[in-house]
Image: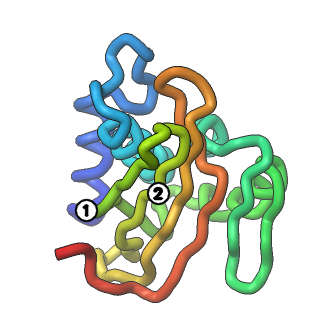
């Protein structure tokens, strides 16, 4: 397992992010979204499609190349193949998270890496606060890899 995936899985496990109770949630909204994104990435590293689905909004829209997957069920259907093998085909981690002042929407972005650690894309996810301390992805779209913020 490449070092990056081991790192992400270790962070998720050490912080208990995949099953973090609301009372243990980070204090700021930005920290909540950052933790949610790490937990989201951790579902891929841990090969847990069910947990992946828990972090997707019912009306989510994921872009997959030129195709658009509309709704949680279609997203899960489209992403099932990424969870089929023992090893994850890619990994990701945020390098920037910003939250609207209203505290209801956020964006996370970061590099997507292949199993060798090579940057192959940049993800951009829009998160919506659906309940106290409960963020879910409503939009997700990849783009060519670019460096992170300064």
Residue 115 picture quarter: bottom left
Residue at the spot 66% in from the left edge and 42% down from the top edge: 53
The reply, left or right, for residue 122 in relation to residue 135 is left
Residue at the spot 73% in from the left edge and 52% down from the top edge: 60
Residue 31's place in the image compared with 126, above or below, is: above
Which residue, given by chain and number where applicable, does mark 1 sit on?
4
The reply, left or right, for residue 141 in relation to residue 144 is right
Q: What kind of element bears circle 2?
A: strand
The reply, left or right, for residue 118 in relation to residue 124 is left
Residue at the spot 27% in from the left edge and 65% down from the top edge: 2
Residue 88's x, y, as percent?
Answer: 48, 62
Residue at the spot 31% in from the left edge and 58% down from the top edge: 5
Residue 8's x, y, as percent?
Answer: 29, 50
Of residues 140 and 17, which is closer to you in this image?
Answer: 140
Residue 47's place in the image compared with 114, above or below, is: above
Which residue, given by chain and number where applicable, does mark 2 sit on?
107
Q: CA distance from mark 1 to mark 2?
A: 22 Å
Residue 23, visible in the rendered structure: yes
Of residues 143 and 128, which is closer to you in this image?
Answer: 128
């Amino acid at each position: 397992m490449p070092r990056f995936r081991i790192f992400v899985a270790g962070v998720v496990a050490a912080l208990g992010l995949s099953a973090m109770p609301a009372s243990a949630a980070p204090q700021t909204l930005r920290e909540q979204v950052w933790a949610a994104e790490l937990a989201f990435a951790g579902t891929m590293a841990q090969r847990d499609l069910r947990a992946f689905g828990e972090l997707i909004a019912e009306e989510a829209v994921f872009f997959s190349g030129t195709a658009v997957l509309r709704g949680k069920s279609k997203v899960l259907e489209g992403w099932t193949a990424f969870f089929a093998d023992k090893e994850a085909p890619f990994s990701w981690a945020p390098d920037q998270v910003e939250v609207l002042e209203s505290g209801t929407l956020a964006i996370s972005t970061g590099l997507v890496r292949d199993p060798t650690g090579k940057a192959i894309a940049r993800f951009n996810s829009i998160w919506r606060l659906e309940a106290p301390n409960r963020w879910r992805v409503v939009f997700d779209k990849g783009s060519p890899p670019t460096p992170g913020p300064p």
